[in-house]
Image (cartoon, rainbow, N blue to C red):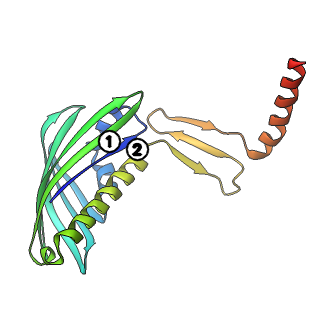
Amino acid sequence: MKLTGSYEIKLDKNSVWEALNNPDILKKSIPGCEKFKKNSDNNFTATATNKIGPFNATFTGNIELQDIKPPNSYKIVGEGNSPVGFASGEAYVQLEESKGITKLIYSVEATVGGKIAQVGSRLIEMTAKKMADIFFGKFSELISPLEIKKEDKTEVKKIIPEKGLILKKISKNILYVVIPIVVLLLFYIVK
């Protein structure tokens, strides 16, 4: 099975690279991840439970980073076992930056065997694509600047974790007052 895809992340390449090597972020990004242990700089052990067709499979496996070229690319090689089958494969991850936006490009080759292979290659491919989308979507969400809304929804704070800055946006009520004043001033200046 082969999968390819790409995601754009509104961060510089170095920040994305650091996040791709952060065990806490990876654990939160992997769908159904229960355990994620860093054994060495390039070796990890993970346990994740996911539904594949009719099976609810818990995989425990090893992940190794190879061909590391910081902050541009690396290869992820992994294998996992479950009571309903096994999976092994490798993914090549490449980062390209343009104007502060990093494009994360991946290509995956994987093999699945055992009972889960009986559900059919089409269903396994759909599940793998969905899991990749969940992983990279969650990964992007975790490392991109976050918006947090107060309960009264009058103020929105924009948090930029890597800079430690908090920027406040003007509430809607203030905008309703400011916009007419600005329009009137512009009208007055034009006259």
Task: Residue at 86% x, 32% y: name it.
Answer: 181
Q: Which residue lies under the disc numbered 2?
A: 143
Task: Residue at 27% x, 67% y: name it.
Answer: 127
* Image position, residue 182 (x, y; %): 82, 29
> Quadrant location of residue 186?
top right
- Graded by Cα atoms within 10 Å as few (under 14), some (14 to 19) or many (20 or more), the crowding at tag 2 reads many
Kindly identify which numbered label has been placed on residue 19: 1
**Mark 2–mark 1 distance (CA, rounded to whole Å):** 7 Å
Dot 2 or dot 1: first in sequence order is 1
Check the picture and name the quadrant holding the N terminus: bottom left
Check the picture and name the quadrant holding the C terminus: top right
Image side of residue 171 versus residue 108, left or right: right
* Image position, residue 152 (x, y; %): 71, 56
**Pointer 2 and pointer 1: residues touching (CB < 8 Å)?**
yes
Which element type, helix, strand or loop, lies under badge 1? helix
Task: Residue at 83% x, 30% y: name it.
Answer: 183
Image side of residue 177 versus residue 41, left or right: right
